Amino acid sequence: MSPWRFVTAFGTVSLLMDFVYEGARSITGPLLASLGASALVVGVVTGAGEAAALGLRLVSGPLADRTRHFWAWTISGYALTAATVPLLGVTGLLWLACALVIAERVGKAVRSPAKDTLLSHATAAVGRGRGFAVHEALDQIGALLGPLTVAGILALTHDDYTPALGVLAIPGVAALALLVWLRGRVPDPIAYETGAANAPATREPGRLPRAFWVYGGFTATTMAGFATFGVLSFHLVERHLLATAAVPLVYAAAMAADALAALATGWLYDKIGARTLIALPLLSAAVPLLAFTNTPGLTILGAVLWGSAVGVQESTLRAVVADLVPSTRRATAYGIFAGILGGATLAGGALTGALYDYSIPTLIVTVTAIQAGAIALLWLGNRSPARHHWTVP
């Protein structure tokens, strides 16, 4: 199988699985609110879910590198997510719904370092930025279809969450079947990668490059000032700006913007390197300025910008890691990088949720200041004109 076919097949797996969990995530805020959650609870739970999805990779990443069973980790993680999502629709207890939201994200933690490592081998042959971007774009087709399906079922059933989430079991089973087939066709994707595609090895074997840690500092800063969609959707429903059934449509629009932003920044990354990432703090700063107004059109535009920022996070951020770290340490690097992301995402979810309850103008000023700091770190850490190079000042 050619590298591009592998990338697109893996992207199709992600398409199907995003149909599952993005369909569920599109209504997490309203679902939790219907069970009695406040904005702070929504912010903390969705932030904690992302923290679990990212922070637990500190364990799964090194274990994947140590065992070299990348396919087993990938399949297990997808299976956990596929089993968890339909259960979310049948619980009537807030604490159980919160636990299921977090459990679904644990499945992502189990699979992601191994999955990204498998994908990084194929992208070495087709271009890091483009390969991860195409995968992300396919991924977001599922992220578009899932919320649209959920929105349609909610409209037909008068906001009944049980069938809306139950139907998501179908693409979950299909994704697992395709993944098992792909593993049989390409049992060892490292064959795609050549020595020329690897980042330079570190001076100290077993340690990650210093540039990786500088890059992690920039990423942590920008994500600490990034709101979760749970808080955005909470605002839309609680301020009566949109009906509950319309919220997944907004999320679908955000996911379409995600795909376009991933393709654009992935292409640009292959041209000019990590300086492309300046788009991330700029988008993140603009989100609360628009999304937390009381004008429906502006809040929708803010959600679209939120989706564009997620597109950069899910594609170009991962591509940079693959270029900074040799393949033998890549799953570990992805796990540590995700841990950094997780802590920052939890902080961002809790911070924006708490500030939303306290004062929206304070939220906007705080996020803007954080993103200004991220831009400063980006400038300091990436002054070299060398392509694909993150330098230490």
Image: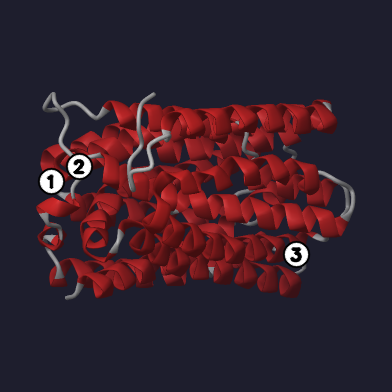
Residue at point 77% right, 59% down?
244
Spot occupied by residue 167 in the image (x, y as percentages of width and height): 53, 70
Please indicate, yes or no, whether residue 177 appears anywhere in the rendered image: no
Which residue corresponds to mark 1?
A: 68
Q: Which of label 3 and label 2 is nearer to you?
A: 2
Q: Nearer the viewer, residue 279 or 78?
A: 279
- Going by the numbered disc 2, the residue's amino acid type is Ala
How many numbered marks, from 0 up? 3
Residue at point 18% right, 38% down?
329
User: Which picture quadrant has residue 62?
Assistant: top left
Earlier in the chain: of badge 3 and badge 2, it is 2
Spot occupied by residue 155 in the image (x, y as percentages of width and height): 75, 71
Spot occupied by residue 48 in the image (x, y as percentages of width and height): 53, 34
Element type at marker 1? loop
Which residue corresponds to mark 3?
A: 245
Q: Is residue 55 left or right of residue 43?
A: left
Q: CA distance from mark 2 to mark 1?
A: 5 Å
Label 3 neighbour load within 10 Å: few <14, some 14-19, many 20+: many
Residue at point 14% right, 53% down?
196
Q: Which of label 1 and label 3 is nearer to you?
A: 1
Residue 64 disc label:
2
- Going by the numbered disc 1, the residue's amino acid type is Arg
